[in-house]
Image (spheres, rainbow, N blue to C red):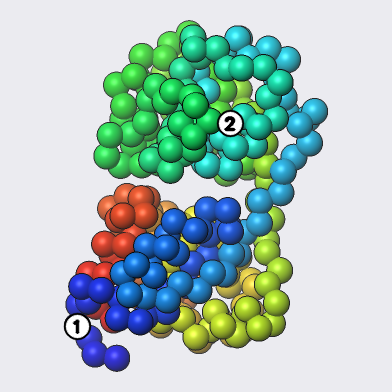
Amino acid sequence: MSMVANTTLNGLKILVTRPEQQAQALCDAITNNGGEAIVFPVIDIATLPVKDWMPSRLDRYGMLIFVSRNAVSLFVEALSESISEQIQLVAVGDGTADTIRSYGLKVAIQPDSIAGSEGLLAMPALHDVAGKTIAIVKGKGGRELLADSLIARGANIAYIEVYERVISSPSASQRQQALTSDCIVCTSVAGVENLCQILGEDIKILLDKPLVVVSERIKTVADKLGFQRIMVTDDVSDAEIMRQLTEMEY
């Protein structure tokens, strides 16, 4: 394969490791740009019992922060009451914001440019939170940066954990197809770690393939796991992932 920058993907096979529920838009973009998307979710989303997380009163919160599309869907669809317009709904990125709006709800705050916790914490509206009670709607576990930063700014934080991430169990044929990819996209630390665990010794076949990740934190983990060519996007959006895929050298 020639070492030239592509303006389209020219038939390249791109391994998409996102959970299946979150992969379609990126896969469509890859196809529309002349590539072949190999859908290979390495994380499954397991819903948690509603009785274990449903708050008795929503009106105790002045703000609900949703950290993913799944967090929005699972939370809103389980509600037996409407969300008061007095509660500010906050999205960590464009995809999450779009999902909130798909339920006819208003997004009060979302990052202007950089998606993710860092972009959200840079928003002026999240600097003036002293004394506010905020719920973060999320999956079980994960980073503490958002909560820790808001607590440091004087907010009272509660977690509403509506799902958990579990490692996927792809078939032997799916694993073999994954090994034919020309490039890999991983958008979480768990994604990189699970990919290596699922493929076992066969991961060596992919370690010299370009790996696109969405943060320096993921890059650090991938580097330790042996990946040789790691590119970090400027933000977590599908548009930025596609820019990296179409402009980098193969």
Q: Report helix, strand or loop for mark 1.
A: loop
* Quadrant (top left, top right, bottom left, bottom right) of the C terminus: bottom left
* Residue type marked 1: Val
Which label number is shown at residue 4? 1
Residue 160: give x, y in percent of width and height. Answer: 64, 29
Which label number is shown at residue 100? none
* Quadrant (top left, top right, bottom left, bottom right) of the N terminus: bottom left
* Residue type marked 2: Val
Q: Is residue 29 or residue 138 the one in the foreground?
A: 29
The residue sitting at 56% across, 35% down in the picture is 72
Residue 53: give x, y in percent of width and height. Answer: 73, 28
Can you tell which quarter of the image residue 223 is in? bottom left
Relative vertical location of residue 234 with respect to residue 83 in this rendering, above or below = below
Q: Which of marks 2 and 1 is nearer the N terminus?
A: 1
Residue positioned most to the bottom: 1
Q: Do the residues labelled 2 and 1 touch (CB within 8 Å)?
A: no
* Residue 228 seen in this snapshot: no
Q: Report helix, strand or loop for mark 2.
A: strand
The residue sitting at 71% across, 69% down in the picture is 169
* Residue 177 seen in this snapshot: yes
Label 1 Cα crowd, 10 Å radius (few <14 / some 14-19 / many 20+): few
Q: Is residue 219 or residue 58 the one in the foreground?
A: 58
Residue 214: give x, y in percent of width and height. Answer: 38, 56
Can you tell which quarter of the image residue 79 is in? top right
Q: Is residue 139 or residue 98 the one in the foreground?
A: 98
Can you tell which quarter of the image residue 149 is in? top left
Relative vertical location of residue 143 with respect to residue 106 in this rendering, above or below = below
The residue sitting at 49% across, 12% down in the picture is 85
